[in-house]
Image (tube, coloured by chain):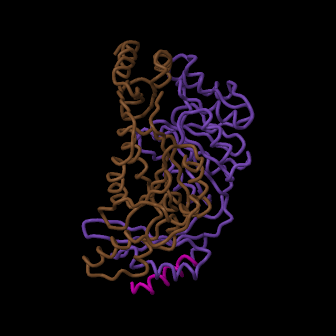
Chain colours: A brown, B purple
């Protein structure tokens, strides 16, 4: 698909994904949001709670550090515990250090006051933010995320992650949202491959994909046309249906 | 967690994951299988159906090509359609080319004979295998996966992927399966962080993690101890419960 939309990557930080304990869902949610708001998601990586791995991945993915994509979004590894090393790793990748951020501290203090609890040393760890970063609002649980360079660092707890995405994405400059149309055929993928290829050749500006599946009635294939121009997508889908006799 | 188990990475190939259309599930399934069979999954990547990206990822991840991990498993991008470019990309990464594999052709021919269909040119594309690769059995739909170097290439359709995993994993030499114990506490993550850190310091051979969640009753945290020695895991969990008064 031809697109001059900003490109993006997602970095998920979490041993619990790699161990199989948790099924990742934040990247899937953000992928849908990015597609709808005109960002071109090109890569997702999941790495362990490991300082060097996180630093290397940020450098490889954040365009402001010479990485491959315009924007980088991270999920997980911020919070109060011993294995939450993301703030330090993000700071290291961006050549800076971590400090208690006054505004973040104030947010946490106000929350503790409201709940009648102490701002303990462990809670205060959630105000450790790389120097030079700006905060990402957390409407769910207070402790903020942050943006530095083109890296946007969000929490891994799904409710919090979604809240941060809702706050952040409208503040970024996206491109044109992706338009798509799909049709399901009760035929195997190899039976429709030639027609799909023929139509794809005629629409080099679009992305045509086929996704086979199996259900109680046997094999079928979902055919999907994606692009930035709704008229072109409709034309390609019409051509495809015509060829397939639908 | 200290481990001399073989390390592994998963490479998922698929525009449909990056567009948000499909929620990835194969990596989660394989993560669970690897954990149970003594492989140490260290990284998951999702890239688009893009030749150069796939080649670069394979080279970065397959230890036999100088990449970071002992083993690499891929999901997706094999099949009969125009966007199934994985076989060519895997061949390029391993410095070889793709040919029709006689055994794969025989498998497809036998299947077509059984179903009374023709082995069309499109179906025959599923027998395009890098020279030097060995086949991975596909009990579900015939078209085989393949292994070359330390890269194991499997289909993206979940039923087929799982069938290939079931066939492949017992044929690889794993290490010791990971043992784990977990406990749920109805306290916030920051309230248990100090106790968790103290226990973690006493068990440097284990991995201790805390996973906050939110439900109808408010906030809670799952505490998980993982390691290769069941006795050590039990000792650490006992120490943790003791500190937390559980």
Specify the segment rendered in magenta.
B232-246
Q: Out of B134 and B195, give the one closest to the viewer.
A: B195
Position above or below: B136 against A240: below
Rendering coords of residue A42 (x, y %): 50, 40
Q: Residue at x 60, y 21 (%)?
A: B124
Position above or below: A52 against A216: below
Rendering coords of residue B139 (x, y %): 55, 37
Q: Out of A12 and B97, give the one closest to the viewer.
A: A12
Find residue B155 and report its image quarter. Answer: top right
Q: Is residue A58 left or right of residue B195?
A: right
Q: Residue at x 51, y 36 (%)?
A: B140
Position above or below: A173 against A223: below
Q: Main secondary structure of the magenta part?
A: helix
Rendering coords of residue A65 (x, y %): 58, 50
Rendering coords of residue B14 (x, y %): 50, 37
Q: Residue at x 45, y 54 (%)?
A: A152
Quadrant where the N terminus of chain B is found in the figure: bottom right
Q: Residue at x 38, y 59 (%)?
A: A136
Q: Is residue A235 magenta?
A: no
Quadrant where the C terminus of chain B is found in the figure: bottom left
Q: Is residue A155 visible?
A: no
Q: Out of A164 and B232, give the one closest to the viewer.
A: A164
Q: Is residue B86 visible?
A: yes
């Amino acid at each position: 698909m031809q697109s001059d939309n900003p490109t993006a990557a997602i970095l998920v930080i979490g041993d619990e994904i790699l161990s199989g304990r948790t099924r990742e869902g934040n990247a899937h949610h953000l992928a849908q949001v990015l597609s709808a708001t005109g960002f071109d998601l090109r890569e997702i990586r999941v790495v362990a709670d490991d300082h060097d791995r996180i630093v290397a991945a940020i450098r490889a993915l954040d365009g402001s550090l010479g990485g491959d994509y315009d924007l980088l979004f991270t999920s997980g590894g911020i919070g109060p515990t011993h294995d939450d090393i993301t703030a330090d790793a993000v700071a290291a990748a961006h050549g800076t250090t971590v400090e208690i951020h006054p505004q973040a501290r104030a947010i946490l203090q106000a929350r503790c006051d409201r709940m009648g609890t102490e701002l303990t040393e462990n809670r205060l760890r959630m105000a450790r933010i790389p120097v030079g970063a700006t905060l990402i609002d957390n409407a769910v649980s207070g402790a903020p995320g942050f943006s530095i360079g083109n890296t946007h660092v969000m929490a891994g707890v799904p409710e919090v992650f979604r809240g941060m995405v809702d706050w952040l994405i409208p503040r970024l400059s996206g491109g044109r949202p992706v338009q798509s149309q799909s049709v399901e055929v009760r035929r195997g993928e190899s039976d429709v491959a030639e027609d799909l290829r023929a139509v794809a050749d005629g629409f080099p500006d679009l992305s045509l994909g086929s996704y086979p599946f199996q259900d109680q009635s046997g094999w079928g294939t979902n055919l999907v046309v994606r692009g930035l121009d709704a008229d072109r997508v409709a034309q390609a889908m019409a051509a495809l249906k015509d060829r397939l006799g639908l």
